[in-house]
């Protein structure tokens, strides 16, 4: 067991002694600060009247519908929300508050998380083949199974580190820019005419948790391609490509019922939170979890089998 | 040799995509000996080494390391092996020291003291904390050897260890390998297509071609018993040829200012004494140590690549 921990530490050393890993964290940090700076710069001044703004926005929406630029059904929800805020006298959460900022970072950051983790996972096995170091890695006492498992475990830990960095660093940056206040900010969601109130910070953290599953699946795919094809570019390229373009493909396919069995239609569990809808109407949370599990088992079985059985000719 | 062999290769065959790369080879390597694996490009040296260290599967046959099958008890077998397959590839973005820490963590009972000991042994102390990407090839070879020796193995396997080294580096590597075999009792397997080098370094040489083992020869036996072409740079040449007439198996030949004659190793000083006795001036004696090479070429039928 202690040797297995040694193997995981080795993988960690290799990930975090690489400049590219720190560049990714650096890019994330710059992104967070930029978002914070823009938000602060474009924030409305304190004495602006949110009631007047809400009324104006409702009028604008209605006018768009009359002109035919927007469909009544598209703006219904938004109008109801604005009206609800006016009726109940609840000031909407301002962008320049810590919870709203963290939510924005989560929204824009998730694509980066998939990209960063896919880059790390996609190189984990194939770079060892590319540099020839795989020959040293596999001619020691640990079995191939243990070597590969230690890499996967290290990848999981790296993912956790990246998530904690995103949450922790955006919290600090947000606090510095907008003050460590407004922790009780409420997000109002109107679903089927019902009004739901939820704590914005809590739902942001929940979404990070749900995103973790999605990132895990893309990382596992990158890791699998890296192992089976021993090709870093393919592994990283394919997983990032799919994560970016699948939403579009999904829309085209959504009229076919079978598309719900496609793995990538099931990875985004945020679709099952209030205010969102899954790609195919009759999909449920349990359904998506089962689909993901089945794919996960098949993918990892192929990956481990390939790594253990095939000749190393690097 | 009645010692227990360190490595046993038993009827090993390797087929890749229907092609027989290695065809039923058989040999054993004993503790304290340096075994040379000789063959032209594409003979199958690297493939055999890859099978010994478990990087490639064995189609047929068995390989035992200190009695442990590499197929069925990989861990127990690998415990006894230190290897460099082809090039000494290391993690370039890590320092030499961290590379060793990395491999120490993969082995049992390698502590900091042992790491320092090995660094001392390969003479990398001054540069060990520099990144490997700043190392010269010779330094990478040393680091590769350090990595292979870290867990004090009984078998050391080096695929073309002198590849890319300068003459001084080659000499050093040779001393090194001989030392490990003679003093530490390691069984060392080296591969090469350079015969002259193997002759100086190995106790036995196995000649491989087209995946077949053509024969295993004892190096020193071979060079003391077999004849070699010796050229004497003398004055006067004709008289020297007459003096040396009844030595060797064939008649001496005159070539420019030299007399060429085939002699065994022991006959060379005898011939020199004879020439001196007849007051013939000797300006140089050169033994063309190519008997083994001839054997090699004979066995492999020239240097053509498969
Ligand atoms: N993965 C592979 N797939 C198909 N053929 C292979 C593979 N690996 C090696 N071979 C073939 O096996 C033969 C032996 O190759 P090997 O690398 O063992 O030769 P070698 O003796 O080490 O040669 P060199 O002196 O050039 O290093 C060659 O003909 C090579 O083409
Ligand atoms: Mg080779």
Image (tube, rainbow, N blue to C red):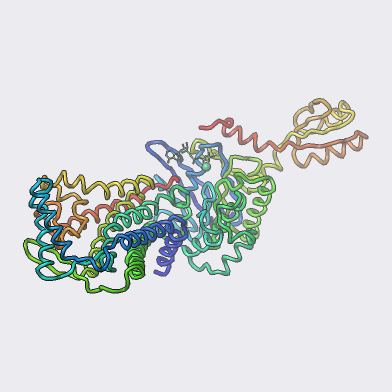
Q: Front-most of A85 and B63?
A: A85
Residue A72 placement (x, y as % from top left): 7, 51
Residue B53 appears anywhere in the view: no
With A236 as the anchor, is B156 left or right in this view? right
Above-or-below relation of B41 to A155 = above
Q: Front-most of A264 and B155?
A: A264
With B15 as the anchor, is A77 left or right in this view? left
Outermost residue, left direction? A193
Residue B159 placement (x, y as % from top left): 55, 47
- Residue A90 image-quadrant placement: bottom left
Outermost residue, right direction? B279
Q: Front-most of B196 and A303?
A: A303
Residue A283 appears anywhere in the view: yes
Quadrant of the snapshot with the N terminus of chain A: bottom left
The residue at the point 62 percent across, 40 percent down is B194
Residue A288 placement (x, y as % from top left): 17, 57
Q: Front-most of B108 and B262?
A: B108
With B41 as the anchor, is B55 left or right in this view? left
With A5 as the anchor, is A198 left or right in this view? left
The residue at the point 15 percent across, 52 percent down is A279
The residue at the point 11 percent across, 52 percent down is A74
Q: Number of marks in the image?
A: 0
């Amino acid at each position: 067991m202690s040797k297995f921990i040694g193997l995981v530490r080795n993988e960690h050393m290799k990930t975090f002694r690489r400049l590219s890993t720190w560049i990714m964290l650096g890019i994330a940090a710059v992104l967070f600060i930029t978002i914070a700076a823009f938000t602060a710069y474009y924030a409305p001044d304190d004495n602006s009247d949110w009631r007047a703004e809400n009324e104006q926005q409702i009028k604008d929406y209605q006018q768009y519908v009359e002109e035919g630029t927007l469909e009544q059904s598209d703006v219904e929800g938004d109008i109801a929300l604005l009206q609800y805020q006016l009726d109940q006298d609840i000031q909407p959460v301002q962008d320049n508050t810590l919870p709203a900022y963290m939510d924005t970072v989560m929204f824009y950051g998730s694509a980066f998380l998939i990209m960063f983790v896919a880059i790390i996972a996609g190189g984990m096995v194939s770079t060892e083949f590319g540099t020839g170091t795989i020959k040293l890695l596999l001619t020691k006492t640990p079995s191939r199974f243990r070597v590969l498992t230690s890499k996967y475990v290290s990848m999981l830990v790296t993912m956790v580190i990246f998530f904690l960095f995103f949450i922790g660093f955006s919290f600090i940056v947000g606090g510095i820019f907008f003050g460590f206040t407004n922790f009780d900010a409420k997000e109002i969601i109107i679903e089927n005419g019902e009004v739901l109130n939820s704590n914005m910070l809590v739902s942001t953290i929940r979404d990070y948790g749900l995103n973790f599953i999605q990132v895990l699946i893309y990382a596992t795919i990158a890791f699998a391609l890296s192992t089976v094809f021993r090709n870093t570019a393919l592994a990283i390229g394919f997983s990032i490509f799919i994560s970016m373009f699948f939403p579009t493909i999904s829309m085209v396919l959504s009229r076919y019922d079978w598309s719900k069995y496609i793995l990538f239609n099931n990875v985004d569990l945020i679709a099952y939170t209030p205010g969102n809808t899954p790609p195919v109407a009759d999909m449920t949370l349990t359904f998506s979890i089962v689909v993901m599990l089945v794919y996960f088992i098949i993918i990892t079985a192929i990956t481990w089998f390939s790594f253990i059985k095939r000749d190393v000719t690097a | 040799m009645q010692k227990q062999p360190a490595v046993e290769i038993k009827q090993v065959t390797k087929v890749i995509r229907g092609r027989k790369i290695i065809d039923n080879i058989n040999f054993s390597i004993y503790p304290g000996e340096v075994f040379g694996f000789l063959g032209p490009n594409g003979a199958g040296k690297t493939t055999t080494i890859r099978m010994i260290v478990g990087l490639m599967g064995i189609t047929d046959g068995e390989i035992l390391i200190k009695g442990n099958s590499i197929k069925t008890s990989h861990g127990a077998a690998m415990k006894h092996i230190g290897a460099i397959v082809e090039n000494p590839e290391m993690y370039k973005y890590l320092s030499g020291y961290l590379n060793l820490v990395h491999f120490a963590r993969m082995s049992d009972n390698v502590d900091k003291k042992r790491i320092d000991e090995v660094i001392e042994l390969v003479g990398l102390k001054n540069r060990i904390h520099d990144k490997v990407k700043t190392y010269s090839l010779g330094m990478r070879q040393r680091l590769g050897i350090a990595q292979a020796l870290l867990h004090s193995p009984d078998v050391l396997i080096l695929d073309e260890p002198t590849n890319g080294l300068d003459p001084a580096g080659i000499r050093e590597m040779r001393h090194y390998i001989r030392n490990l075999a003679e003093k530490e009792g390691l069984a060392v397997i080296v591969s090469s297509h350079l015969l002259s080098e193997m002759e100086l370094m190995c106790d036995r040489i196995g000649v491989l071609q087209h995946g077949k083992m053509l024969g295993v020869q004892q190096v020193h036996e071979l060079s003391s018993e077999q004849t070699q072409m010796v050229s004497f740079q003398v004055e006067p040449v004709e008289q020297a040829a007459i003096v040396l007439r009844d030595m060797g198996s064939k008649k001496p030949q005159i070539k420019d200012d030299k007399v060429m004659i085939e002699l065994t190793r022991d006959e060379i000083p005898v011939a020199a004494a004879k020439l001196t006795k007849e007051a013939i001036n000797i300006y140089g004696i050169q033994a063309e140590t190519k008997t083994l090479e001839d054997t090699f070429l004979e066995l492999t039928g020239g240097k053509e690549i498969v």
